[in-house]
């Protein structure tokens, strides 16, 4: 009798332990680091396209999660250290990873262009050899500067300053990302500029990147399913509005 009671007690303890462990695993939060992109994924709380997109898609996934805004370099460091689970948005393979990561399907496409004044059309970097091209400080353009080494690239503190220098003829072009520029400049200012949308200098795809774990793979599968539905129904285009670039 005592032996049977002892065995039964062990069984109950085992069931309680495994149930608790499963509950802990199921309840593990996905920590997503947001990279602050003014007017696109905006930490100020304003109504921005990626804010709305992530809020809507995450509300349809039952996995618990937390989000926090982190500077780009810091978010990638924390992902490397596995102190956060995911980063959004990222350009695949831009950073080297010591451990495997997984990517979502594409949430949007981003292209880089040289913007010039409409009455001074010259949106080819080949034609800007020896000329001065402004770009906003902090933006990364990969190997573009090395490829066009005969152009003079000048970092400026703000987009407003870049446009002002362009209008004053103190720079010959402004290197920026589309469709990001459509969110940061007024319609009036955009109408002053020219660029060739069909001939981007670079093209990249925004994605969600997560550390490759069982929990994150389950989350990513659901994320991609919801993203696919949004694309099929036109909801993604409706959410992103003029930021939509497919």
Image (cartoon, rainbow, N blue to C red):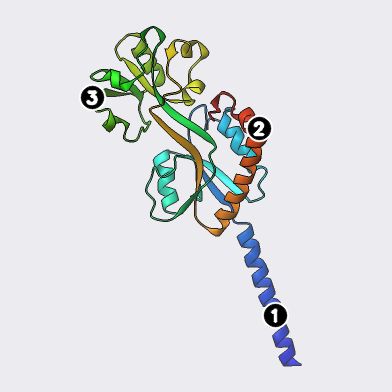
**Label 1: few (<14), some (14–19) or many (≥20) C-alpha neighbours in 10 Å:** few
Distance from label 3 to label 2 (Cα)?
43 Å
| Numbered disc 2: secondary structure | helix
Q: Is residue 241 above or below residue 8?
A: above
Instruction: Identify whether 97 is placed above or below 177.
Output: below
Cα gap from disc 2 to disc 1, whole angstroms: 50 Å
Residue farthest to the top, as pictured = 119
x%, y% of residue 26?
63, 59
Q: Is residue 117 left or right of residue 27?
A: left
Please state which of residues 43 and 218 is positioned toward the viewer in this rendering. 218
Circle 3 Cα neighbour tier, 10 Å, few/some/many (<14 / 14–19 / ≥20): some
- Where residue 145 sits: x, y (%)? 29, 30
Q: Percent from the top left, x then y, of residue 9?
A: 71, 82
Element under disc 1? helix
Q: Earlier in the sequence, mark 2 or mark 1?
A: 1
- Asked if labels 1 and 2 touch by Cβ distance under 8 angstroms, the answer is no
Q: Quadrant of the C terminus?
A: top right
Looking at the rendered structure, which numbered label has been put on residue 141? none
Read off the residue under disc 3: 150
Q: Residue at x 65, y 36 (%)?
A: 232
Q: Identify the residue at horizontal 23%, vertical 19% (top origin).
A: 130
Spatial CA distance of label 3 from label 1 is 75 Å
Kindly identify which residue carries mark 2.
235
Which residue is denoted by mark 1 in the rendering? 11
């Amino acid at each position: 009798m005592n032996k049977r009671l002892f065995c039964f007690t062990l069984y109950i303890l085992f069931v309680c332990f495994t149930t608790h462990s499963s509950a802990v695993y199921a309840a593990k939060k996905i920590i997503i680091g947001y990279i602050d992109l003014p007017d696109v994924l905006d930490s100020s709380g304003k109504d921005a396209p990626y804010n709305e997109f992530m809020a809507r898609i995450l509300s349809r996934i039952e996995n618990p999660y937390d989000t926090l805004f982190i500077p780009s370099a810091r978010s990638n460091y924390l992902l490397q250290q596995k102190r956060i689970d995911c980063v959004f948005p990222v350009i695949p393979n831009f950073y080297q990873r010591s451990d495997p990561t997984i990517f979502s399907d594409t949430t949007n496409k981003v292209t880089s262009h040289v913007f010039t004044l409409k009455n001074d059309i010259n949106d080819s970097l080949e034609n800007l050899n020896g000329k001065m091209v402004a770009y906003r400080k902090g933006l990364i353009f990969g190997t573009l500067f090395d490829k066009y080494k005969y152009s003079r690239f000048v970092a400026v503190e703000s987009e407003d300053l870049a446009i002002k220098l362009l209008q004053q003829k103190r720079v010959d072009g402004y290197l920026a990302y589309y469709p990001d520029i459509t969110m940061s400049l007024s319609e009036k200012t955009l109408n002053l500029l020219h660029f060739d949308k069909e001939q981007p200098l670079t093209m990249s795809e925004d994605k969600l990147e997560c550390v490759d774990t069982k929990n994150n793979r389950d989350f990513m599968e659901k994320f991609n399913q919801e993203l696919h539905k949004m694309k099929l129904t036109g909801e993604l285009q409706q959410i992103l509005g003029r930021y939509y670039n497919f």
